[in-house]
Structure formats: C-alpha cells, structure tokens
Image: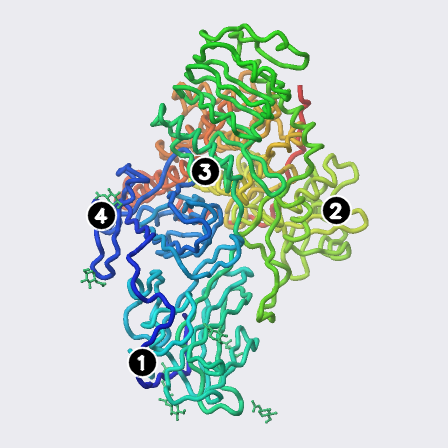
Amino acid sequence: MEGLIYWETRVLGFYILCISLILQQTRAQEGFVSLQCCAQTNFTDPNTNISWTTDDQWYPDISSCQEISPPTKVRVFSSTFGNKWCYNLKTRKDENYLLRGIFKAGEQQRSPTGTRFDVLIDITSIAIVKSSEDAVVEGVFKANDNYMNLCLSKEMGDPYLLKLELRPLMSEYVKEKATVALKVMDRVDVGSTGAEIRYPDDPFDRIWRPEPGDENVTVSSMTNIVITNASKTSPPIQVLETALTHPEKLQFLHNKLDTGFYQYELYLYFLELNESVQPGQRLFKIYINNMEVEEIDIMALGSRYRMLVYNFEANGALNLTMIKAANGSLLGPICNAYEILQIRPWIQGTNQADKDVIFNVRGELLAHNPNNKVLVSWMGDPCLPLPWEGVFCESRDKSTAISKLDLSFQNLQGPLPQSITQLQKLRELNMSNNHFSQAIPVFPSSSVLTSVDLSNNNFIGHIPDSLASLPNLVTLLFGCNHQLSRDVPANFYRSGLDTDKGMCGGSGSLHMATGIVIGTVAGGLLLIVGVVGISFWIYKRKATAKKREFDVKGYPLTKNMIYSISSMDDIILQSISIQSFSLQDIETATQQYKTLIGEGGFGPVYRGTLSDGQEVAVKVRSATSTQGTREFDNELTLLSAIQHENLVPLLGYCNENDQQILVYPFMSNGSLQDRLYGEAAKRKTLDWPTRLSIALGAARGLTYLHTFSSRSVIHRDVKSSNILLDHTMCAKVADFGFSKYAPQEGDSAASLEVRGTAGYLDPEYYSTQNLSAKSDVFSFGVVLLEMISGREPLNIKRPRTEWSLVEWARPQIRNSRIEEIVDPNIKGWYHSEAMWRVVEVALSCTETYSAYRPSMVDIVRELEDALIIENNASEYMKSIDSFGGSNRFSIERPIAIPPTPVPTEPSPIPSQPVPPKPR
Ligand SMILES: *[C@@H]1O[C@H](CO)[C@@H](O)[C@H](O)[C@H]1NC(C)=O
Ligand SMILES: *[C@@H]1O[C@H](CO)[C@@H](O)[C@H](O)[C@H]1NC(C)=O
Ligand SMILES: *[C@@H]1O[C@H](CO)[C@@H](O)[C@H](O)[C@H]1NC(C)=O
Ligand SMILES: *[C@@H]1O[C@H](CO)[C@@H](O)[C@H](O)[C@H]1NC(C)=O
Ligand SMILES: *[C@@H]1O[C@H](CO)[C@@H](O)[C@H](O)[C@H]1NC(C)=O
Ligand SMILES: *[C@@H]1O[C@H](CO)[C@@H](O)[C@H](O)[C@H]1NC(C)=O
Ligand SMILES: *[C@@H]1O[C@H](CO)[C@@H](O)[C@H](O)[C@H]1NC(C)=O
C-alpha cells in the first residue's frame, strides 16, 4: 500500500454482535500444516496457539540447514541432481487452500550473485523469490487431488525456505474446478492501528495487514456489530470493526503489483459503522485505475454489510478510489477491508495415472537403493516444469505422459519394478548397466515400447514372451546378463528387430545402432503425431475496468503458459512484442546496405543506425542461404519470446517482398572469438578475470535457454564467435538460427539433420543424431578451452596432434599439465585455483558420453565459484600491492567493469557452419 490520501476515521456507534451463519467460532487448526524448517522440536506459538512442526519428515538431512541470523535456520536446497525440491502435502480434493511460504535469505544466498527461484503450487508458478528481499509468498488454489506439492524450482543459486503453512479455506476464492491459482498480493485491514490479524481471529489464518493511515487519523474500535448476511469469505469481525471514511474521497494506491498484464480479483468489504445512517445517505462511486466501476449504497440491499468482487487488469499498479456521489449523498465513502489477488492460470501436470505409477516405481527402487541421488531428486511432477533426471515426456492433446525412462549407469540393485510396465505411453526403456537382479517383469500387450535396453545387469530367467512379442518393439538389448537365458521364443527374431541376441559384445557400437533406429522410428511417428507446441496464455480481457492507463505496445509476455496447445504458430502470433520494420526503414537505416560487416549462415550482415540513433546489425537473408524460411521463423519465434541479459535481443524484423531481415542491437565489443585470437586480440589481450566473467555470462544465457519455459531450447551452434560482447563487455549469446525446442518424444525427425560447427560438435550427437542440451554443453566446453588456451578449436596448420583443441587439451589436463595449455598471454595472471575450476568444468563438458557431462546449471555454479575465488584473490593481491608486494594484478580496475569499449569494431558474424554429413 503506497499511499492513502484524504482520510479520516470517525468514532462510530456501538452495535450488537450477531453473527448469522458464520464461522467465527474457532476451529481447532483442522487441516493446518505449519512447518518450521530445520526446527529441532515441535512447538506452539504462544501468540497464535498454532502448532508448528519440523520439516524433517520431508528432509531429514540436517546438513541442509543453514543458520541465517542465529538462532533462525533456513533449509537450503542444493544438489547436483534435480532442479526442484518439493513438499508433498495432504489435501482434500476440491477444497480451497491457502498456501504460504516464508523465505529469508542468509548472507550466503545474497552474495555475490544472488539467488532466484520459482515457487510452484504443483507446477503452477505463483512467484519468483529473489534473495535481495525477504519474501512471503501466498497462493490460493483448489486442490485437484488428495495431495499437492509445493515446489521450489531453481533458477540461480540454491533455493531456501524458512516456513511453510497450508490452510484449508472453507471460502470459495477459486470456484470453478481448478483453472486458476490466485497469488495474494495484499490483504488490508483498513483503519486498523493494531497488530496484524490472523488465526485464531481469522479461522482460515489469513493475515490481515493493518493500514492505520497517517497522523490525521483517529481510529475507532468497534466491538458490537450486526452482520445479517455474510459469506464464507468475510473477514473476521476484528477486521471489519475498523474502517476509514472521508467526507469526499478515499484513495488507495498500490505501485508494486507485478509488471506485465495480469488479471486481478479485488475483494472489497464494506460494513456501515454509523448506526444512524439510512439507505441513500452514503452513496459513493468506486474507481479502479480511473474507470468507474460502480456507484454503491451499502445499505440499499437491507444489510449493513456488502462484499463486492471486481476483476481488473493491471500492469504494475492499482489505483482504488472511492468518491462521494456528486449529489444526493450526505456522507462520504467508507472502506473496511480489501484483498488483491492475482489470477494465474492453472497449469495441468502430467497425467495422473503416470504420476501414480512413477511414484510407485520410485518407491520400489528407493527401497533397494535408498541413497541413489537421482531417485532422491525425483520430486513433484515427473515432467513439468522440467522433467526429472532420466525421465523424458511428451505432451499431446493437453495431456503429458512419460515416454522414456533412462536409468542406465545408476548402480541400481534389486528387482526391476513390475509397476514400470504400467506406464501407458512409455516407448523407450533403458535400464542397462545396473545390477538389477531377479526376473524381467511381464509387459502387458498394450505396451507401446519400441526400445528396451536391459543389458549389463544380473537378470535371471528368460526374456518373457510378453516382452518379445510387443507389437512396436524395434530394439531389444539384453546382453551381459550372465544368468539370463539366451533362449528366446521361436517368433522372436522377426524382421526389423534390432537385438544383441543376448550377446555380451562391444556396447559402444550397439549404442550407436540403437540411436539411429530410434531416431528413424520416432521420425516416422512425427508425421502421425503432428505438431505439439506450447503457447502463451493471454488473459481473456473481460475486466470490469477495461481502460488502461498505460501506453503499451503489443502484449508483453507473461510467465504463465499452458502446455500442449496446438501449434508453434501460436507463439509467433501471440508473443511477438518486437518491432516490425518496413523495407524502407531498413534501407534508410543501412544507407542502402552500405556497410557490410560480415557474412553468416543466414546471409550478409550490415551495420545501420535507426532513426532514434540506435546502432544496429541487420541480417539479410540471402537468396542462396542454406538456411531458409524455417530458420527465419525459428529465430523470430524464439527470439521474440526469449529475453535474458545474456542473450542478444531481437529488436525487430522485416518480412516484405520475400525479404527476411532481422534487426539486432550492434555489439560494440565484437565477439569472444575476435578477442581471443582475432584482430582485436593482437591489440589487447583479454585478461583472465574478464574471460571468466564472459564465460559465466554466456553460461547463464545458455542456462536460461535450456530451462526456457519449462521446455528446453537447444542452441545447437554454441561457439566463441556466437558469444558477443556489448559495450560493458557483458557476454551475450547470439544466433538462434539453428535453435529449436529440445526434441520431445515425437519430435525427433528434426534432430536427424546434424548441425553445428566443426570443432565444436558433440561427438555423441554426431554419431547418434540424438540432440540434447548436453550437445550445447559439449560446445560450451570447447569455448572454455578456447578461453583457457587462446587457441582455435580446429587448426590444421598446427602439428597433427594439435589439430583438435579438445583432443590436444584433454590428455594434458588429465596429466595435470595445465601450464601447457594456458594461453601464454595470461600466464602468471590468474589464480590457479580459479583456473583449475574452469579447466575441470571444461574437461567434464567435453566428455565423449553426454551422460557424464554436467548441466548448464551446474556449470554456472562452478564458474560462479571460480569467479569469486579469482575476485577475492584479486582484491587480496591489490591489498598486498599497496605494501609493495607482487604486482600480479597491475590492471587497476574492478573486474566487473571491463575494458574500454572499442566502438569502431564491427559486430561479429558467425563463420559459415559446416554441416557434417550424418554417417
Ligand atoms: C491458547 O490456548 C490457551 C489454552 O487453551 C488459552 O488459554 C489461550 O487463550 C490461547 N491463546 C490464544 C491466543 O488463543
Ligand atoms: C512433530 O509433530 C509431527 C506431526 O504432529 C509428528 O509426526 C512428529 O513425530 C513430531 N515430532 C516430534 C519431535 O515431536
Ligand atoms: C493531515 O491533514 C493536514 C490538513 O488537512 C494536511 O496538511 C496534512 O498533509 C495531512 N497529513 C498527511 C500525512 O496527509
Ligand atoms: C452518522 O450518520 C448521521 C446521518 O445519518 C450523521 O449525521 C452523523 O454525522 C454520522 N456520524 C458520524 C460519526 O459520521
Ligand atoms: C486515481 O484515480 C482517481 C479516480 O479516477 C483519479 O482522480 C486520481 O487522479 C488517480 N490517482 C492517481 C495517482 O493516479
Ligand atoms: C447480502 O444480501 C444481499 C441482498 O440480499 C445480497 O445481494 C448480497 O450478495 C449478500 N451478501 C453479501 C456478502 O453482500
Ligand atoms: C444529480 O444531479 C444531476 C444534475 O445536477 C441529475 O441529472 C442527476 O439525476 C442527479 N443524480 C442523483 C442520484 O440525484
């Protein structure tokens, strides 16, 4: 509440309390869940009598407890596996609930890069918590099952939690069957000078914030009030018995609502507190964001109490004003309480049957493998917003199901759970290279499995007939199970079945064969399946208050989206908030394409200046371009939706006369490639701390892509020439022309075409054509090696053993000879611990098998650590310097603010990629 002007509270008469049907009789915390994270014991809060319990039932590990300001502890969630942490709480289906999370960051979460995470009710995001501010996040939702999950989904750093409260609401904030979740923005006890009001006064434990007003206000306390009709949503009497009134006008301003167009619900509560007021004596108009929504007379309906609910739409601000009616009213407006709730569309999770099955599978596997980190990280929804480690999903007809399960190389023991066979949409099952024992489960004939890999285990008995005769099965591997009979049913070796016949052979080549077969099959399926995309939710614009006071171009994107809507086109139609240029504009800006600054896969790139003075790089599609309309649409779709400080933003486009043109801001510091070993490098060496911060920036940009909209976007052409540097040397990843949404089941055909640039290409992707985010990780690893060594990824002018940067560097690193590979220009100018961190990351990124590579999220974390180490060392060395010590850090400038921009350099253009032929 930002300001409350023109008020004055009256001392009003006393009334007789007479509550009709309502629920003010205190219910005994029925259904309350009150968790105090990391508490050592259960306890009762003497102020509220609320019983708090510890959360060790969910997280028994005390090592994740961190003291923030003693003795307060928070739970801090960190793990190399998984990206979300959940509390599974019991609910009653179809009942309304209030969920409140209290988040308090410690020093560690605040510094130096900050922490950011999403708070999800099941998979519907209700808030983003940032460590820069303590947060109370409150949501209201309707349970659609007998349990719900509160999840924290990490974006940056480790999520943390202080308290969690779940309260059943008998009131019907969410009326229809789970279509929305409401985020509580504010709940105001108008005219109160006392403390906040919550349980037990409010039986639902809503917390009412007192709004006493300023020095001009005298607030009355009323104890006896008549309410003849109240609803379940009514605030408690203690809230209603204070109000603000003014002879003319009451105004409530909120300037801190979320930006972006959201719909809101505004609950207004009025109770006439002046005994002598008659109908017709207090008439006033209500304005929401300058729109008159209603003229009301509280008493007109024969009751002193009125509740009104309005829908309105706002971008950041609410102006709620009540003005005395122009004529005919004796008294000015009154207001007792109000609530502002933001409407968020409810996002449908994975289909219930699959969810139940996979939870059983998890339970059975955990029983024999209680410490398996991957299984422990399986929490909340298996597919959304990001799938669990080893789980792959597909969305079709508004339903999301599990299509692939890969738990290979997990050291798992015990039986393979029979329940796994109940996953209706499971097409690929890879349980190879574990220690599974006992018999292979029996599969129902309805199973749509196409590929099963059970090799390298300890299974006993036979391959069940049921498995061998599955109609869609194309690949079946069961070699290296020494107690498993190789006898198979007579009809087993039918044509088209790819199998190792139970033989224990070279697994590498088998893997490759499998990949291709799967790719082909999935590719065929794609034609039948049709396009599955996601789309952005644009709110229905039914607001009572329609007029907006903001001048806004297009629709800004909201964070909300529904999954599995018809097609990718929706994204183009609905999400573009970028500028559209005419060909004339482009010609003027580039002075008839005067300054050619490069040639990329898309076509030539020209430098230009827009009419407002902004310098731009204009990419024009050439007629001979190997990329085409599809790339154009790709880039347009993606770039318009994707916004991150470490990604080159698309300013606009032009699609006129068959010309396809993209307009980007001009990046004055060129590309990382230029700076490492291009012309620019000859003039000035890029120092190590700057290289590190560029690496971190680029890694963050890629992390954003990989976790974009709950559906990963793979860049497919990560390389140093695609990492551009703006005038502050902030790294921005460029060129999404090759990007595509990460393949989901049924999309695989597009991945058949191997793309990328020689020297950066993931060998696994190259050989199997199975594209994943880990391919970008490989390429990023190559970029890290370039930064470390200052060498090109591929240079056939060097001795044969040094042609490939990766092949040359890896053995040196393995033998701890990093001095051999470090760029001579930065020798002696880095902290070796920081260097080692980066070298290790680069090594793991460039692992041949993608399973061994880290995710971008992990890489960001490592690089953050490296940068901290380097910066601390730098500070330390400087302090020593002042006493005449070493001059290792002679460059006197903060690392975060890198060198003088060189505005004359052209925006770098990626070199022509070399699409290798698939084998
Ligand atoms: C808490 O419970 C005790 C015992 O039942 C009671 O005396 C006390 O008034 C309660 N406090 C509140 C704030 O309700
Ligand atoms: C705390 O309360 C919970 C729920 O009532 C109970 O399951 C748990 O055993 C209690 N813990 C202790 C230490 O009393
Ligand atoms: C209180 O009322 C006086 C007189 O109307 C006004 O000048 C003053 O600004 C008011 N104070 C606040 C904080 O609004
Ligand atoms: C109560 O209402 C009467 C009119 O019905 C008015 O004359 C009186 O001033 C009001 N009292 C207060 C405290 O506003
Ligand atoms: C709030 O709305 C009222 C009524 O439309 C208007 O008179 C007033 O100027 C607005 N105030 C602000 C700060 O926008
Ligand atoms: C109170 O009664 C009036 C008329 O009977 C009705 O319109 C209104 O919805 C009721 N409830 C509230 C909370 O105002
Ligand atoms: C208010 O006054 C205007 C003209 O002065 C008149 O047209 C209108 O009917 C009046 N409204 C009420 C509610 O008395």
Viewer-nearest of labels 4 and 2? 4
Callouts 4 and 3 close, C-beta under 8 Å: no
Q: Position of residue 519 (x, y in %)?
A: 64, 25
Q: Residue furthest right?
A: 657
Q: CA distance from mark 3 to mark 1?
A: 61 Å
Tag on residue 16? 1
The amino acid on which the numbered mark 1 sits, given as a three-letter code, is: Ile
Identify the residue under disc 2: 660
Viewer-nearest of labels 3 and 2? 3
Q: Earlier in the sequence, mark 4 or mark 3?
A: 4
Q: Classify mark 4: residues with Cα within 10 Å, few (<14), some (14-19) or many (20+).
A: few
Identify the residue under disc 3: 857
Q: Classify mark 1: residues with Cα within 10 Å, few (<14), some (14-19) or many (20+).
A: few
Q: Classify mark 2: residues with Cα within 10 Å, few (<14), some (14-19) or many (20+).
A: many
Q: Earlier in the sequence, mark 4 or mark 1?
A: 1
The amino acid on which the numbered mark 3 sits, given as a three-letter code, is: Val
Q: What residue sits 72% from the left and 40% below the top?
A: 630
Q: Earlier in the sequence, mark 3 or mark 2?
A: 2
Q: CA distance from mark 4 to mark 2?
A: 65 Å
Q: CA distance from mark 4 to mark 1?
A: 40 Å
Does any atom of ligand 2 lie closer than 8 Å to the CB of label 4?
Answer: yes
Using the rendered image of the protein, determine whether residue 794 is visible from the camera's viewpoint: no
Mark 4 lies on a secondary structure that is loop
Side of 567 where 69 appears, left or right: left
